[in-house]
Amino acid sequence: MPSPEGSSVTFRRVPATLRRTPIERFARRLQTEVAQGVPFDTLITGDAELRRLNRDFRSKDYATDVLSFPLGNTGSGLGDLAISLVRARAQAREFAHSIETEIQILMLHGVLHLMGHDHEIDRGQMARLEKRWRAKLGLPAGLIERVES
């Protein structure tokens, strides 16, 4: 659940090489600019927890990079995101940018899902929206573009 102050980022374990401040600042920026002021919470954790969440809530027994859990009209925020630090680190290496940048890409993608967008069924609407937001936020290629390439 979002904190009274707004969007929060919780780390299960913070590696010494990860800079928390840019990620926390980016969450607040996403809340203000993308989510129109509506808060959300992000959990940054490991593959085991993402696999469990994916299995329990989506019946898919594998780890993934980001999961979104929208609150819909039942709560005071958008919902929750869960991000795999292991996947974010590997993808950051693969696409030659920082882990902080990769987490930001995953957060943007997840927030768009929290807002009701679904790239699997919307005939490119979410992909176009994500591309516009990435340009505004100064982020490199996003998840949807990577899959389509």
Image (cartoon, grey):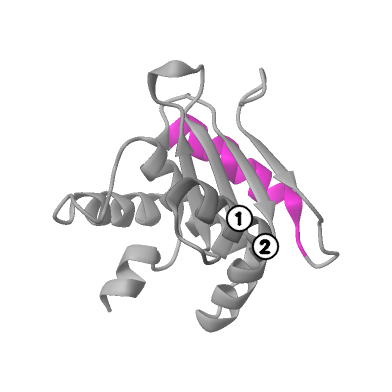
> Does 22 appear in magenta?
yes
Give the number of the disc on residue 81.
Answer: none
The x and y percentages for residue 97 are 57, 74
Q: Name the magenta segment's main secondary structure.
A: helix
Residue 134 position by quadrant: bottom left
Q: Secondary structure at mark 2?
A: helix
Left or right, residue 47 beside residue 113: right
Q: Along the line of sight, which residue is nearer the eye, 31 or 118?
A: 118
- The correct choice, above or below, for 3 with respect to 27 in the image is above
- Contact (Cβ within 8 Å) of mark 1 with mark 2: yes
Amino acid type of the residue tagged 2 in the rendering: Ala
Left or right, residue 40 beside residue 4? left
- Looking at the image, residue 144 sits to the left or right of residue 10; the answer is left
Q: Residue at x 53, y 63 (%)?
A: 65
The segment highlighted magenta reads 18-33
Q: In terms of image quadrants, where is residue 131?
A: bottom left
Question: Where in the figure is residue 114, as x and y percent of width and height?
Answer: 41, 38
In the displayed structure, would residue 127 be above or below residue 75? Answer: below
What amino acid is at disc 1?
A: Arg
User: Is 2 positioned to the left or the right of 134 in the image?
Assistant: right
Mark identifier at residue 48: 2
Q: What residue sits right under mark 1 in the picture?
A: 52
Label 1 Cα crowd, 10 Å radius (few <14 / some 14-19 / many 20+):
some
